[in-house]
Amino acid sequence: MTLTLNETNALLTKAGIEPIESSIFQMMLSSFKPSLLFTALKGASKDVGAKRWVLNNLEPLLEQVNQDNEATSQYSESDVSGSSHQAPEEPPTPDVMQESYQERQAHYQHEPEPQQTAAPDESREYKGHHVYGTAAALYFACSKTKAGIFTLSIDGAVSSGARKFDWAKKVSLQVTQAELPMVSAVLFGFIKSCEFKNHGPAKNKGFKIEVQSNKNGKHLFFNLMEAKKPMVSVPVSAEDAFYIRNLLIEQLLNNSPQLDSYSIIENLKVFARMKCSAE
């Protein structure tokens, strides 16, 4: 497919992002497939994950252009004074294949990137979801186990100031194949709570999810734990839980491509009834 500058700026404006110049647009086309770029831009107006993906990948391009402009200005001044310089090396092109958990600088300085090593699937608008509390924050991302099971990875960090979180000291773990049905059942409200421990090489990590109620209805409360680190405790609203459930459905379908989402949810209901009767 083809994507024009006018179409791109129209989608950026719709998502509340500043339009870009032709040079930035050409750099984006050279870094990403047009179909992938269009999917992300189209989703940016309605999905926070897609918008942050766009912002994350725009920022290094904008910085590169600014650096090039500054370098051009410096060389112009040196030409006037009669001095000469070698042209600077071109900054590396942003790589869409890089999806590690690094601290982001766009929108929120503290946001980690999805724990992925492959390029985002062009048919999907996001790969993860952030949940922000006043004292801590969580990030849920699609990932795969070493055995090839599709699951979720979870990062948590405590607050380090207003709208800032200490991701450098984050707690990270991955939901195991055995834990995935129980976690899904709790997120879908079929089971009230779950708790798992012994995560990580040192078996010193764990998490707990609990369905709670207040005057505004039901929500989830999530605790992420690692020995010798502060506990990450974050309330998860119904809105945030909606997007996390979408990630879970996606991964469960990836594990059982012969099924549809209805069959997956019905299977979770049966699983929940069996677990509850066993208790």
Image: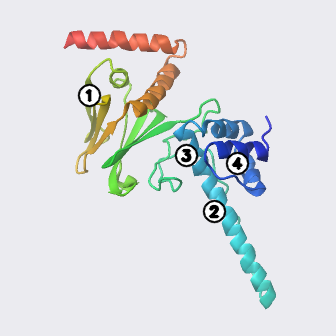
Marks 1 and 3 sit apart, C-alpha to C-alpha, by 31 Å
Q: Earlier in the sequence, mark 4 or mark 2?
A: 4
Q: Which of 200 and 32 is in front in this view?
A: 32
Q: Earlier in the sequence, mark 3 or mark 4?
A: 4
| Label 3: how many Cα within 10 Å (few below 14, some 14–19, many 20+) | many
Report the number of numbered marks: 4
Q: In which quarter of the image is residue 33?
A: top right
Under mark 3, the amino acid is Arg
Q: In this view, does 224 lie to the left or right of 44?
A: left
Q: Nearer the viewer, residue 95 or 167?
A: 167
Residue 130's spot in the image, x, y percent?
44, 41
Q: What element carries label 2?
A: helix
Q: Which residue is disc 4 drawn over?
A: 31
Q: Is residue 274 left or right of residue 144?
A: left
State if disc 2 and disc 1 touch (CB < 8 Å): no
Q: Quadrant of the N terminus?
A: top right
| Mark seen at residue 213 | 1
| Mark seen at residue 63 | 2
Residue 165's spot in the image, x, y percent?
37, 54
Judge whether residue 88 can be spotted in this image. Answer: no
Q: Which residue is disc 3 drawn over?
A: 52
